[in-house]
Image (cartoon, rainbow, N blue to C red):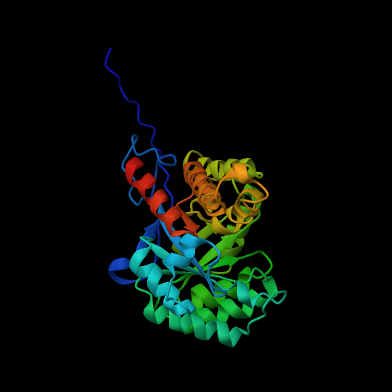
C-alpha cells in the first residue's frame, strides 16, 4: 500500500526578522510548520548557525581552536578569520569582558571594539552583552548608536533593562532586540509584551529563552521551546510568534564532559572532541525543539550543524 503523506501546516506563522544588510543579511523565522518538518512544507528560511567571538579571545589551549585562529591575535582579526573561513551565517561578538565582576572593561572601550568589528565583518552581527543588567543598559544604548545603519541584533535585553534598551536600540537607531528570559514560556511571553508596549515594532524582536547543555537540565529548555512554537503556530498566540536564537557555546563548553582533563578521565577521550560533541548534540537538540538560530564556538561544530541543516531542510 503506497504511503500517503498528511502534511501538518498552520494558518499562523513565525514573524520574520532581518539581521544585517546587503547580500549577506539573514532572515530568521517565517515558518508555518513544526521545527525541521520540511516534509510538511518547505522552510521559508532555514535555521542559521553563528560563531561566537569573545572580546577576551578564544581558548587557545584547544588545538583545533588554536589552529583555526593562528595568527589572528586581536578580536578584530578573529572576526575577520571567522567571516572568511568558519562557514557561519553570522558572527556573535560576546562582550564578556565588560562584566563588572570580571575584567570590567569600560563602555567606551567596548563601543570602540564594536565599531572596529563592524567595519571589518562581512557577515551580520549579533552583540552579546556582559550579562550584567546594570552594565548592559548603557552598553547596548551606546552600541546601538555607534552601529546605526548596521541592523545588528543586541542579545539580550531582560525584564530589568528592556525598556531603555528597546527605546535606544529599536526606536532610536533601528536595531534588533533580543528578549532574554529564563526557560519559562510565561516569562518569555510577558517580556515580549513589555517590549512591544515600549513601542517596538514586532519584526525587530528575537527571543532568547535560555539554554542548557544536553544532559544538564536540557529537557526544560526543550519543553519550553516546543511549547512556545506550539502556542505560536497551533494556538496563534501572537505574543510568541517570534524567532528564537540560542547561544549554545557557554553551556556546552562549561560542563564536566568538556573541561575535565584526559589524565583524570582517560577513557573519555580528548577534551576538545568531548566539547565539540557536547556542543553539536546540544545545538541539534535545540534546533529540533524549535530554535531558529544557534550560536556555537568551535568551527568544527559550525560545520557539523550546517551539514545537518542542509541534509534535513
- Image side of residue 306 versus residue 216, left or right: left
From what the image shows, is residue 226 above or below residue 27? above
Q: In the figure, residue 251 lies in which quadrant?
A: bottom right
Q: Tell me: residue 12, above or below residue 65.
A: above
The number of callouts visible is 0
Q: Residue furthest top?
A: 1
Left or right of 27, for residue 195: right
Res 246 seen here: yes
Write the residue at 45% across / 52% down.
292
In depth, the one of 78 and 97 nearer the eye is 78
Q: Residue at x 51, y 40 (%)?
A: 230
Q: Is residue 130 above or below residue 236?
A: below
Q: At 34% from the left edge and 45% from the top edge, which residue is drawn?
A: 43
Percent across and percent down for residue 222 are 57, 42
In the rendered image, residue 195, in percent from the top left (x then y), is placed at: 58, 64
Viewport quadrant of the C terminus: top left
Regarding residue 15, the answer to whether it shows in the image is no
Location of the N terminus by quadrant is: top left
**Nearest the eye: 9 or 112:** 112
Q: Position of residue 175 (x, y in %)?
A: 46, 73
Q: Relative to the observer, which residue lies in front, 11 or 78?
A: 78
User: Residue 30 at x, y = what percent?
Assistant: 38, 51
Q: Residue at x 65, y 70 (%)?
A: 161
Amino acid at each position: 500500500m503506497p504511503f500517503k503523506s498528511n502534511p501538518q501546516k498552520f494558518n499562523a506563522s513565525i514573524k520574520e526578522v532581518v539581521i544585517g544588510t546587503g547580500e549577506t543579511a539573514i532572515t530568521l523565522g517565517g515558518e508555518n510548520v513544526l521545527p525541521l518538518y520540511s516534509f510538511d512544507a518547505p522552510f521559508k528560511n532555514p535555521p542559521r548557525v553563528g560563531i561566537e567571538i569573545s572580546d577576551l579571545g578564544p581558548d587557545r589551549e584547544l588545538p583545533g581552536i588554536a589552529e583555526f585562529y593562528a595568527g589572528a591575535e586581536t578580536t578584530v582579526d578573529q572576526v575577520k578569520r571567522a567571516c572568511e573561513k568558519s562557514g557561519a551565517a553570522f558572527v556573535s561578538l560576546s562582550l564578556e569582558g565588560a562584566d563588572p565582576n570580571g575584567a570590567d572593561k569600560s563602555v567606551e572601550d567596548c563601543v570602540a571594539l564594536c565599531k572596529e568589528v563592524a567595519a571589518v565583518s562581512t557577515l551580520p552581527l549579533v552583540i552579546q552583552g556582559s550579562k550584567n543588567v546594570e552594565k548592559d543598559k548603557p552598553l547596548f544604548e551606546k552600541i546601538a548608536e555607534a552601529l546605526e545603519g548596521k541592523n545588528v541584533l543586541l542579545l539580550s535585553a531582560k525584564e530589568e533593562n528592556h525598556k531603555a534598551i528597546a527605546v535606544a536600540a529599536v526606536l532610536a537607531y533601528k536595531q534588533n532586540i533580543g528578549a532574554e528570559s529564563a526557560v519559562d514560556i510565561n516569562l518569555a511571553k510577558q517580556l515580549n509584551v513589555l517590549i512591544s508596549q515600549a513601542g517596538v515594532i514586532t519584526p525587530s524582536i528575537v527571543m532568547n529563552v535560555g539554554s542548557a547543555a544536553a544532559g544538564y537540565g536540557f529537557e526544560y529548555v526543550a519543553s519550553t521551546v516546543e511549547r512556545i512554537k506550539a502556542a505560536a503556530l497551533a494556538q496563534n498566540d501572537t505574543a510568541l510568534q517570534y524567532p528564537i536564537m540560542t547561544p549554545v557555546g557557554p553551556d556546552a563548553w562549561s560542563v564536566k564532559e568538556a573541561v575535565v582533563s584526559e589524565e583524570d578521565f582517560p577513557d573519555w577521550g580528548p577534551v576538545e572532541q568531548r566539547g565539540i560533541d557536547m556542543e553539536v548534540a546540544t545545538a541539534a537538540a535545540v534546533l529540533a525543539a524549535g530554535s531558529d538560530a544557534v550560536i556555537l564556538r568551535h568551527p568544527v561544530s559550525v560545520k557539523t550543524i550546517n551539514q545537518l541543516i542542509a541534509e534535513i531542510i
